[in-house]
Every structure is written in C-alpha cells, then in structure tokens.
Amino acid sequence: APSPAAQATYNNGNFNAIVLDFAQTTSEAATFQIAMPKSWDKGEILFAPYWTAGSGSGTVNFNFFSVALSDNDPLNGTFTTAIGAVDTFQNADRLHIGPITGLTPDASPANDDLLLFAVNRFPPNDTLNADARLIGVKILYTINAGNDS
C-alpha cells in the first residue's frame, strides 16, 4: 500500500491536501468505493489522476481497476483489467492532471451497487524517478435519466 494518507501543505500553509504517496520502486495500490446513483447508465467510467511529485523527471503510470458489488455479494469481487493513465512530470510541487482513461466495472453493475475502485502505480511501467503523490481522482460517467426516482 502507498504511504498512509497524509496531509501535505503547500503555499506557506494556505493549501492543504490529503494525499497518497506512491513509491518509485515498489508497486503499490489504494482502494476507494462509491455507491453510484441509479441514473448512471452502468457503462464506462472515466478517470483522470490529479498528482504531483517533489522532484524528478519522467512519466508516471497510474492504473485504475473496478468491480461492482450488489446486495449480499461477497466482498471479494474480481477487479477489471487495469486501464493506465500515463502522464509526464512537469515541475515539482505543481498540480499535474493526467489523461482521462476509461473502463467498465466487472460483475454486471446494477442499481444500488457499491463500486470498488483501486488505483496503483506499477514502477516497472513508468520512468518517474521520484515518489508520485496522488492528490485526487476525477471521475466521469454517463447518466440515462434526469434523476434517481
């Protein structure tokens, strides 16, 4: 797992963010979950990593995975095949917005499902010679109804 979530401080304390630091030499993963609205079309979900690094050069590869769990499903679902978002380091301690990439969660998503997501950094597939600090993840999805009634 990446270093435990920590509060990073920037701009002389005027900006604080909860972050996850992914090491440059070890494959590490973190998970999060979201209960999706009924209006979600149960299709592709798009992701973009928001990240930075304190120094370095090269590219970072964040991989995303997902699985849908319905009521009474075991909590050991099989994640999708990884979808990677590769981004180039620009400047230390500056916001980097990675490319949008998409996947469809495994396990036939249904209304009221809990979607489990995982994000990892797999250093053999990137060249960033520093820890990659994940600040956030943009998530986009398509709806097929104007509300959830």
Image (spheres, rainbow, N blue to C red):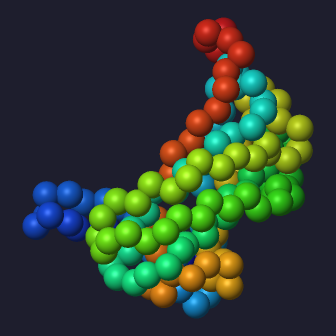
103 versus 51 height, above or below: above
Residue drawn at (56%, 53%), measured in percent from left and top?
A: 99
Q: Residue 4 location in percent, x, y?
A: 46, 75
Residue farthest toward the bottom in the current orientation of the protein? 25
Q: Quadrant of the N terminus?
A: bottom right
Quarter of the rendering containing residue 111: top right
Quarter of the rendering containing residue 43: top right
Depth check: 45 or 33 in front? 45
Residue drawn at (49%, 68%), measured in percent from left and top?
A: 88
Residue farthest toward the left in the current orientation of the protein? 12
Query: Quick check: can you spot residue 91?
Result: yes
Q: Residue 93 location in percent, x, y?
A: 29, 70
28 versus 20 height, above or below: below
Residue drawn at (79%, 50%), measured in percent from left and top?
A: 67
Depth check: 84 or 141 in front? 84
Query: Quick check: can you spot residue 131?
Result: no
Q: Residue 9 location in percent, x, y?
A: 22, 67
Q: Is residue 86 left or right of residue 70?
A: left
Depth check: 13 or 32 in front? 13
Q: Is residue 13 left or right of residue 38?
A: left
Residue drawn at (53%, 74%), measured in percent from left and top?
A: 59
Q: Residue 147 location in percent, x, y?
A: 61, 11
Q: Is residue 65 left or right of residue 133?
A: right
25 versus 78 height, above or below: below
4 versus 100 height, above or below: below
